Structure formats: C-alpha cells, structure tokens
Amino acid sequence: MENFKEYAIAITRIILGLIILVGGLIVLDIFIYLGATGSTFSDETAHAFSDSYDQAYVRTFEIGYQRGYTKAYDKGYEKGYEIGLGHIYEERVGSLAELRNPTYIELKEFLAADDTNNNAYVSGEYVCYDFVAELNNNAEAAGIRAAYVRIRSRNWAHALVAFETLDRGIIFIEPQSDKEVTLEIGKPYPWWQVGAASPLRRQAELTEIQIIW
C-alpha cells in the first residue's frame, strides 16, 4: 500500500513537472517572438484589441447602414411621390437640387477646397465610413454626384468615394487623403500609399467592390 502511494506521488510529480515545463516553453516562445518583432506583450494585446474592435465596428456599421438605408429609401420614395403629385406641396420637382457629374478638373478643384481629409482618424469614433459620409454630403451640397464604395477582403471591409467624371470616367478617391486609388479584385488595397488607416496589419486581396450611387 505504501509502495502504491509512493508511485502515485511520483507520477503526480512527473505530471506536474511536465505541465510546468510545457508552460515555460510556451512563455519562452512568446518572449522570443516579441523580442524578434520588437513588440511588447501590451503592444500585441493592444493590436489584437484594435483589430477585433475595428472588424466588429465594420460589421455592425454595415448592418445598421443597410437597415437605415432601406427605411430612409421608403420614406424618401413616399415624400417624393407626394411632391410629384402636388397634393401637399406647391414646390415643383424641378426646383429641387440636381446633381451632376463633374469634369476631372472640377473634381480636383472640389477636393482641394474640401476639408474632409484634414479630419483625424479616431478608432471607434471617426473611421473610414465617417470620412465617406462627410465627403459625400459635401459633394452633393456642391451639386456633384458621388457614390459610396464598399470594398471587402476575407479579413476586413473599407469604404471610399467614387465620382464619374465626364472626361476620365469613374475615379475612386480615398477620403482620408483625397488621393486617387485603383481598385482591382485579387489585389491588395494600397493603404499606406494612399494615406489611409489600415484596419489590420496584414495585407489581404480584395474580394468584392460595390458601388452605390
């Protein structure tokens, strides 16, 4: 009986020793990785939190956008129908604001005068969708037709603005910098080249480009 107890104690010690050894190796690997990348554990934790926060923000924003868009579309349709019939309002439809496609030079002049790109990117508060909304609103206030552009990869989503110019066709603009950008399925988005805050630190190819006028 005593021998059995001794064997049990010995086995338990061996198991505990293995657990401690494995745990120590894992911790050692973490510190080696952090040392090689020049990061600290707090840095990696902050990056992970920021990445997951931005992804969650993007998904919930798009759900809210689609629901709000549908409701606003229905309300706008009803109001436009009433105006068109003239039963409630005497104002003619032709007197409402009309949007037009600009020339390339007109687009560049508008962007140069617009201050949206001077706003600061604040994670969770003022992000890519806020830049797009402001630039779109400012363009329409100036009588210029603008589109909301949504792009996706497997790991992230992003938004920018498009203008259909009369002389150069569709131009995609990164509203955080007013720089032109070329979009192509299967190619990564050039975050740093166009001066945009990246939601993730790793590159990923575009899988979807959606233009909403």
Image (cartoon, helix red, strand yellow):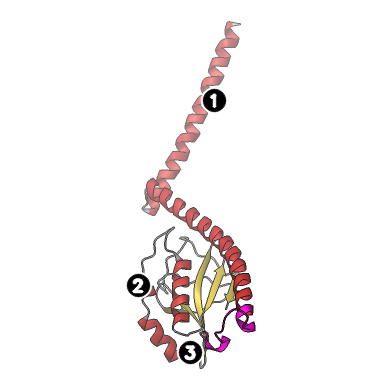
Q: Nearer the viewer, mark 3 or mark 1?
A: 3
Q: Label 1 belongs to which residue? A: 15
Q: What is the span of residues highlighted in magenta in the rendered image?
A: 82-96
Q: Which circle's residue, 2 or 3, is located before the other in the chain?
A: 3
Question: In the structure shown, which secondary structural element does the residue marked by tag 1 occupy?
Answer: helix
Q: Position of residue 31 (x, y in %)?
A: 40, 44
**161 lies above or below 204:** below
Amino acid found under the numbered disc labelled 1: Ile
Q: CA distance from mark 1 to mark 2?
A: 60 Å
State left or right for residue 43 relative to residue 156: left
Q: Nearer the viewer, residue 174 or 28?
A: 174
Q: Are marks 3 and 1 in contact (CB under 8 Å)?
A: no
Q: CA distance from mark 2 to mark 3?
A: 23 Å
Looking at the rendering, in which quadrant would you find the C terminus? bottom right
Q: Which residue is at a point 45% across and 51% down the rendered structure image?
A: 49
Q: Nearer the viewer, residue 19 or 51?
A: 51
Report the number of numbered marks: 3
The answer to which image quadrant residue 169 occupies is: bottom right
Q: Label 3 belongs to which residue? A: 102
Q: Nearer the viewer, residue 51 or 62?
A: 62
**99 lies above or below 75:** below
Q: Which residue is at a point 39% across and 46% down the rendered structure image?
A: 41
Question: In the structure shown, which secondary structural element does the residue marked by tag 3 occupy?
Answer: loop
Amino acid found under the numbered disc labelled 3: Pro
Q: Label 2 belongs to which residue? A: 118
Q: Position of residue 9 (x, y in %)?
A: 54, 15
Instruction: Verify whether residue 206 appears in magenta.
Output: no
Q: Are marks 2 and 3 in contact (CB under 8 Å)?
A: no
Instruction: Verify whether residue 92 appears in magenta.
Output: yes
State left or right for residue 62 relative to residue 23: right
Q: Which residue is at a point 39% across and 61% down the rendered structure image?
A: 122
